[in-house]
Image (cartoon, grey):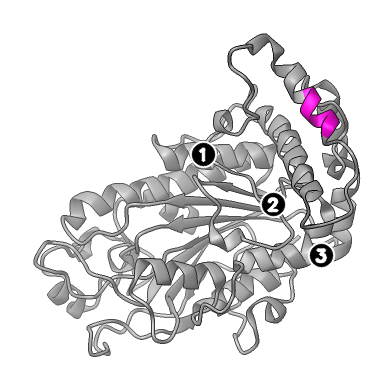
Amino acid sequence: MVISRRDFLLRTSGFVTVSAMVPRWAVDGSRLFEESIGADFANRTLVVLELAGGNDDLNTVVPYSDNLYTQMRSRIGIAPGSVLQLDGRLGLNPVMTGLKALWDHNRVALLENVGYPNSSLSHFAARDVWHTADPQLAQRNGWLGRWADRYIAASGNPLACTAISQSLPRTLLSDSVGVPSFVNLASYQYATDGSFPGDRSNQIRTFLTQNGAEYEIENTPDALSRVAEDAIHSSDMLQTVGSGYVPGGVYPAGTLGAGLLLIAQIINANLGARILYITYGGFDNHATENSDHDPLLTNVSAGIQAFFDDLDAHGKAHDVLLMTWSEFGRRVADNGSNGTDHGTAAAHFVVGNAVRPGIYGGPPNLANLDSNGNRTIENDFRAYYGTILQDWLGADSAAILGTGYPNLGFVNRSYA
């Protein structure tokens, strides 16, 4: 028997022992979101994978037919004969067999030479630029936080946006939508007095009773109580998602594999998740890049493949799109420490059944570098974001990002 999201939430609220009442968002959230975004887009989920540190895309997507690549990467370049060819000019790093398998099944779009004018090469500033989609850093909230304020605030679902992260990514910072951030389910629970473990349920019931009223006034202590109440209910829901779950893919060991598995479990639980965010770090490879970068790419590639294998096995891949980003690329020439320094343009992946597969832009023009030895920008990152906002999330991208950024066409908007 197929159970709707609404029925699942209502039933879960009934049997979880610490749930003293049905959450406000359980009944009306799905309907309100559908009304705000449109029925064709209401069930879609976007997974955002941040590769923190500045991924070296030239050793990720290798311009293997360009002799300048082997000259400028004389220390750490990937051997042209070893790449996993995508076409006659570009190929994946040979460790990325999982992503290549998805490519071969027409589930990957590759965006080349993505960035913005006058790129910042500071990790802190560049991450904020990508988080906010604003090179001037005039925006306080993140680009998806602004989307959330506009489209899902009325749904009241505290699990509409979730980050598998130690802290809230600025991408999801908003005015009206709370975002749970945690690295595992054990860490996302109401902390009761450990001296009285048998009294845990009573302590939580007491809290919920004290904070169970309907609150109408925002930005008040009452509003904070409402947030706390929602956090407990969302925690209750999430504690159930892994119970009896059998993964349909073989995830790599480590934090990325565990995080992607958790995201698959959340999707499979039909909790109305619309944005799921995960960060994987270690990409600031100034030295010994070959020994450090390849294992990272192995995990990214294997993790994405396992994630979609898992979704396929549970019949959930249809409504999921995954995108990657990193705060900048790397300089074209390798350095004396067998690594690469901060650069500008980079390549990014979009994975899912709804992509229009292929390469968008490129290959990198290594003969036309700026005075610092960095590449020129071909695809503005706001066009990248805007295409996802418009064609996957059904949003008015100009209202969130501003005007003037072309749709890059890598998502099949009418996909159903």
Q: Residue visible at 59% across and 12% down? A: 195
- Looking at the image, which residue is at 81% across and 28% down? 12
Q: Nearer the viewer, residue 75 or 193?
A: 193
- Distance between the Cα atoms at labels 1 and 2? 17 Å
Q: Is residue 133 above or below residue 222?
A: below
User: What amino acid is labelled 2 in the image?
Assistant: Gly
Task: Pick out the residue farthest to the left.
Answer: 336
Residue at screen point 77% across, 17% down: 202
- Of the residues shown, which amino acid type is indicated by label 3? Ile
Type of amino acid under label 1: Val
Element at label 3? helix
Q: Is residue 371 above or below residue 293?
A: below
Mark closer to the chain start, 1 or 3: 3
Residue at label 3? Answer: 37
Secondary structure under tag 1 reads loop
Q: Which mark is residue 178?
A: 2
Is 207 a magenta residue?
yes
Q: Looking at the image, tell me whether mark 3 or mark 2 is earlier in sequence order.
A: 3
- The outermost residue toward the front is 221
Work out how far the residue at label 3 is from the one at label 2, CA to CA, in angstroms.
19 Å
What numbered label is drawn on residue 183? 1
Residue 209 visible, this angle = yes
Residues at discs 3 and 2 in contact (Cβ within 8 Å): no
Q: Position of residue 193 (x, y in %)?
A: 62, 19
Horizontal side of residue 34 vs 234, given as left or right: right
Magenta span: 205-210
Quadrant that contains the C terminus: bottom right
**Residue closer to the observer: 20 or 217:** 217
Q: Nearer the viewer, residue 291 or 92?
A: 291
Query: In which quadrant of the rendered view does residue 205 lie?
Result: top right
